[in-house]
Image: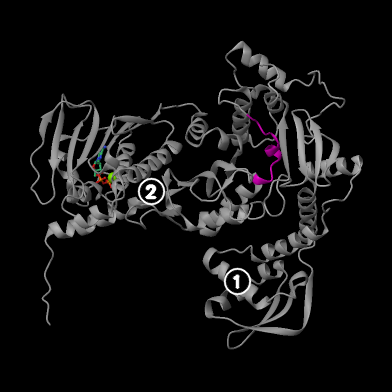
Amino acid sequence: MHRSIEKLSSYVADQISAGEVVERPVSIVKELIENSIDAGSTQIDIFIEEGGTSLIKVRDNGTGIVKKEATLVFARHATSKIYQIEDIEKIQTLGFRGEALASISAIARVHLMSRTIKDRHGWQTIAKPNQPLPFPTPTSHMIGSTVEITELFYNVPARRRFLRTSLTEFSRIHAFVKCIALYYANIGLTLYHNHKEVIRMVPQETIEARHFRIFTVFGETFFNNSIFVNKEEPIARLSGWISSPNFSRSQANLQYFYVNGRCVKDKLFNHAVKMAYQDVLYRKHRPALVIFLEISPTEVDVNVHPMKSEVRFHQSRKIYEIIFNTIKEGLSQKQWHLKETNVSFNSPVIQQKIAYSHQNTLQNISHLKENSVPQLSTHRQQLQFKMENSQEIVKPYEHAYIKDIPLGYALAQLHGIYILAQNEQGLVIVDAHAAHERVLYEKLKKVVKEKIVSVQKLLIPIALKIDEEELELAKTQLNLFKKLGFDYIIQQENTLLLTEVPALLHHLPISKLVKEVFFDLKTRGCSHRVEDTLNHLLAALCCKSAIHANKKLSIEEMNTLLRSIEKTQHGGQCNHGRPTWKQLTLKELDRWFFRGQ
Ligand code: ADP
Ligand code: MG
């Protein structure tokens, strides 16, 4: 049957376009908050009712909108943020597509109120689907804008049916507002649900502000189990907080990645995180982290997704390496030994940690300098700080503790499994097998890496079929393959003859491994495949050779193991990501026995 072609009415076309931008209430909240940020606001208040289905209202103190533009904002592709296509390459704002307000007003009622610094009063416009825009009328309003959304999806029943309960919709909004709060510490934020205050964060201009936000949003446990990382490279700057492998969850819901202030989902990032943690994380646990990447807008394409929730990097391989290396280096820092319990943000320990982080940011130095000691307000804080940092504290133990031996001295072995040791804070319990496993593993890895990589010449070369892209890589990346321990000859008809392979791996399905290296090179521009396979092998070897349960250890042997753990990278986790030791502080013990209460 013939069906005639007809041009869609603008009403239908608008609704279809709106579907790309407005999926659910949180999509609207996102667009409105982004507009408020782009307008230079320092205070944004968000009011939600019934998960956003009956009201979404965002009020800001930004630049506002002049009367003659108060209707234009609802037109599709109307924006003040770009004028030519090249402008996208130097974009500094979160918005640029000029379609959010148009899309929202195609599926809901939008009431806009706004006033600029030049106006004596505000102006308001009400936009509704499929209705002509009325002229702006005067209203009272402070400088800035308020956008109020009601009757959401009233003309799109299909969308309405897809909405979840108001609690679920609100939890998405809540999560998004937190996401904004983490980066924009200079903006004050409040969030209300059904007239109840859920978030109140004051704007902070100080350098510690972002750390404070991390502390408020993620809580004390994350803060105490994470460290600040920072890396400056010619192409980009990366900073953020990464969790200790011992603080991990089974879901990846605490992983935030920001590119120039835009919170994005990114496969490259996910993969780099997974690879950086894979050696130290228990089974399917996921680390928690917040990473901020600042990069020249010319290096990143932000126009790849209608909701702007994805980006594409021009030099993705370099970005991957920066993320991977920064996390990996962060994870090998000895700072994990500084485990604080029951500290509040204002406590000296945290202040000291922040001071340290900032020193790190500015100069990348590894020690706290005298002049970096933070200003401590109260006398009590000063005293406490002095106590904690003094070398002359009288210790009630037989040993003197110096800072390099956080695991203290062995006291005894428990049931042939655990080493009990005493350190400055109290009791340390060490899983001897797990710890020894890690010590051996890191040693072996080093040996293998230094001899990278002993190779085995093949008597009978392995033939491997390759496609055109792989042929190109085989030609250009021979050096890289040699570094990994491979050598080959290229034959006609797209065949690769492998003549040398890494000695330790020669009994594995080599063709598959080489194919995987090619795959990584194609998709990410780099490959850790060979190193990973080697590491897996080494890990299995170490597990077999490490001290096993019921092996009696002398005090000297135990102390030797403790010192090795301290010197070992990732000494805090075994090769399978289980913790190798735990601290029980005197304070905790005192609490058990109601001492001093
Ligand atoms: P975009 O943000 O991509 O430009 P929008 O549809 O979100 O597109 O907004 C259209 C225009 O309306 C913006 O370019 C901006 O000039 C103006 N605008 C929207 N919201 C605000 C606000 N809260 N404060 C000031 N101007 C705003
Ligand atoms: Mg916008």
Q: Which element carries disc 1, helix, strand or loop?
A: helix
**Front residue (pair 309, 362):** 309
Residue type, mark 2 in image: Lys
Label 2 crowd bin: few (<14), some (14–19), many (20+), radius 10 Å: some
Which residue appears farthest toward the top when viewing the image? 379
Task: Give the magenta-colored segment's residue range.
Answer: 331-341
Relative to residue 191, is residue 1 depicted above or below?
below
Is residue 69 shown left or right of residue 440?
Answer: left
Q: Percent from the top left, x then y, of residue 81?
A: 29, 45
**Front residue (pair 146, 321):** 146
Residue type, mark 1 in image: Glu
Is residue 524 shown left or right of residue 56?
Answer: right
Residue 424 drawn in magenta: no
Query: Residue 81 bears which disc, if any?
Result: none
Closer to the chain start, of discs 1 and 2, is 2
Residue occupying image coordinates x 75% and y 20%: 390
Quarter of the picture containing the C terminus is top right
Q: Is residue 43 visible?
A: no
Q: Percent from the top left, x then y, of residue 168?
A: 35, 46
Q: Residue 51 lies in what quarter of the image? A: top left
Q: Which residue is mark 1?
A: 516
Relative to residue 473, is residue 303 depicted above or below?
above
Q: Which residue is mark 2?
A: 90
Q: Which element carries disc 2, helix, strand or loop?
A: helix
Residue 334 drawn in magenta: yes
Residue occupying image coordinates x 71% and y 19%: 595
Quarter of the picture containing the N terminus is bottom left
**Front residue (pair 133, 385):** 385
